[in-house]
Structure formats: C-alpha cells, structure tokens
Image: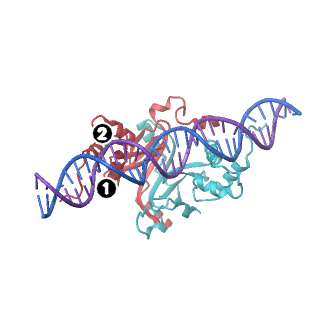
Chain colours: A cyan, B red, C blue, D purple
Amino acid sequence: MNNVRQSKKRDAMLTLLRGTTCHPSADWVYQQLKAEYPDLSLGTVYRNLNHLCGHGLIRRVGPVNGQERYDGTLSPHSHFICNRCGTILDLPQQSPGQNWLESASVQYGFQAESCEFIVRGLCRTCEDQQPYAQNSTLEEKLS
Amino acid sequence: MNNVRQSKKRDAMLTLLRGTTCHPSADWVYQQLKAEYPDLSLGTVYRNLNHLCGHGLIRRVGPVNGQERYDGTLSPHSHFICNRCGTILDLPQQSPGQNWLESASVQYGFQAESCEFIVRGLCRTCEDQQPYAQNSTLEEKLS
DNA sequence: ATCCTAACAGTAATGATTCCTATTAGCAAA
DNA sequence: TTTGCTAATAGGAATCATTACTGTTAGGAT
C-alpha cells in the first residue's frame, strides 16, 4: 500500500546529500554516483533532486556560478558563499528577530516561507590568490 | 582625455535602473528601451549591465526564476522575493549585528564582501491565488 | 499472470547568457 | 581635415544548465 515506490538511486542521492557539507550541484552528484551506478543518467539526477526538494527532504541553496546547489541539512541556518570558487559554508542561524520578520511581513503584506542570511565574499583558500582570475574551479573544489 | 567613452544607451540603462524599484531583468530593460532605441541589441544590454556592475554603479540581486535581476539602489538593504511571480521588494537593512558577522568571519576565515537577508514567500498579490500554479509545474506533478 | 504506474535512460528542446565578428562612431594627434 | 585608435555596438552563433519528451523497464497490487 505504499504509494511512493522505492528507488535505489534516489536513496543513494539522499544519503550522499546528507553525508556531505559541500552543498553539491546536480553534476557533482551525477559524477559521484556514476561509479556505483554506471547507467545513471543526468536527467534522473535532476528528476530526483526535484523530487526530494518537493518532498522537503533536501533544500535548494540557490544558483552559484550558474548551477543550482542543494543542501541535505534541513535545520535552519545561513550560508557564506565564496564569490570566486563557489564554496558554500554553513553558518549558524543568526537572523534578525522574529519580531522584525513579523512586522515586516505585516507592513509589506507578504507571507514569508523561508528566510536566510547570505554572506558573500572570499573563502580562506581564495583570499590569498589573485582576485577574480575568472577560473572558478567548482569541480576542483568539490572533487 | 576621458578614457571612459560615453554611451547614450548605457546612460539610459543606468537612468532606468535608478528610476525603478522593480529590480529588472535584462530582458525587461531591453523591452523598455527598445522603443526609444530601436536598434538596441540584447547583447548590448547584457554587456552594459555587466559594465555597470563591474564599475559598482548597479548591483546584482541574484537569479530569480532563471533570470538575473539588477538593482540600481546601492545603499545596503535586504530583499523579499515572491516565490511565484518573482516580485522583489526592498526591505530595510536589519541584519545581524556587525559583531556577529565579524566573529563569524574570523571563526570561519572568510572575508565578507556583502551580506543580505533574503526572505522568500508569497507577495500580497499572489497570496490569494492558487498556490504555485504558474512556475512550479514540477511541484504539481509531484503532488 | 496481468495491470498499473513510478522510475529510468537517452535524447531533443529550451532559454538565459556569453562569445565572436564585423561595423560604427567619437576622440586625439598630425 | 585626415588619419588612427579604440570603445561601443549589432547580429548571430555558441554555450550550458536544466527541462521536456519518448519509449522502456521493473516492482507492487489485484
């Protein structure tokens, strides 16, 4: 009577997402699981990432350097995003108080579904290098 | 002796960006200026948007529904983004204190260049409509 | 055993953005 | 004025992440 069919590949994706802190892209997930599942297709990765997001099992971080990034950590937290290499760090949730968000939502008439404090800049690794040499090597950092 | 050549189209773009609060996309700018400059090209819009960003005259808000959005307001502020129609509202800057950001940057070793509090949800106009009928074909299929 | 349908692979299509190439136009020195 | 240099530009091709489409497979239910 289970209306959600099992899927080994989707399960592997969820395990992978939960076991890393690097906030992977779809392609990274594909590359990682291609070894264990040689017939894995990139379309399946996208389909399952959307499926997992739609069921609230993972979250979208937002596109970085043109690629959407995903997060297996569901607890509320904020992010630091390196402007060069795209590394994403988890930051402890330290948002403006609930009262501010509530009053703002009343004042502007919106209905908040999520909020996040996003800091952008250079990560420790990129700080010492030539600024913005246009070689954002996401693959290197994530491999 | 001026090494920055003038450009009527770029100037018009900057004026347009500064005169609106709708955080336009490249295509919106193109559509708006096409009437006054019939020979305007979309490539020119992208080139000038990047030029203006590179010179700090406008800012990127981030991609919403697959399209980058731009902001002519340079003063620090946060954003509300409607998950359905993509409307972006300016929110007064109410970020975690400078001390938190400083201690976090020390603790994690990053060098912050910008920070923003991003709230996502439904805007006033979209609240009363059927949820996510427009741009979440995926969520519908999954439900 | 037979349906039914989710999961899947492979591939085509989409669409925003960038890249490439040739052309135009404004400024400066001769 | 004329020549030369270069930014600005148009138009179109190319790129690339993502989605859509099509046919197939496989596992649970009846």
Report whether residue A105 is seen: yes
Disc 1 is placed on an element classified as loop
Along the viewing direction, whichever of B25 and A95 lies nearer the viewer? B25
Task: Provide the chain ID for the residue under circle 2.
Answer: B
Query: Which amino acid does the dot numbered 1 rest on?
Result: His
Question: Where residue A42 sits in the image (x, y, percent)?
Answer: 63, 49
Along the viewing direction, whichever of A70 and C2 lies nearer the viewer? C2
Mark 1, residue position? B55
Query: Which amino acid does the dot numbered 2 rest on?
Result: Asp
In-image side of D30 versus A11 (left or right): right
What's the distance in space between the residues labelled 2 and 1, CA to CA? 25 Å
Question: Where residue B111 sits in the image (x, y, percent)?
Answer: 43, 64
Along the viewing direction, whichever of B109 and C27 lies nearer the viewer? C27
Q: Dividing the image into 4 quarters, which one contains the N terminus of chain A?
A: top right
Task: Provide the chain ID for the residue under circle 1.
Answer: B
Mark 2, residue position? B39
Mark toward the start of the polypeptide (2 vs 1)? 2
Residue drawn at the location 22% of the way across and 58% of the way down: B3
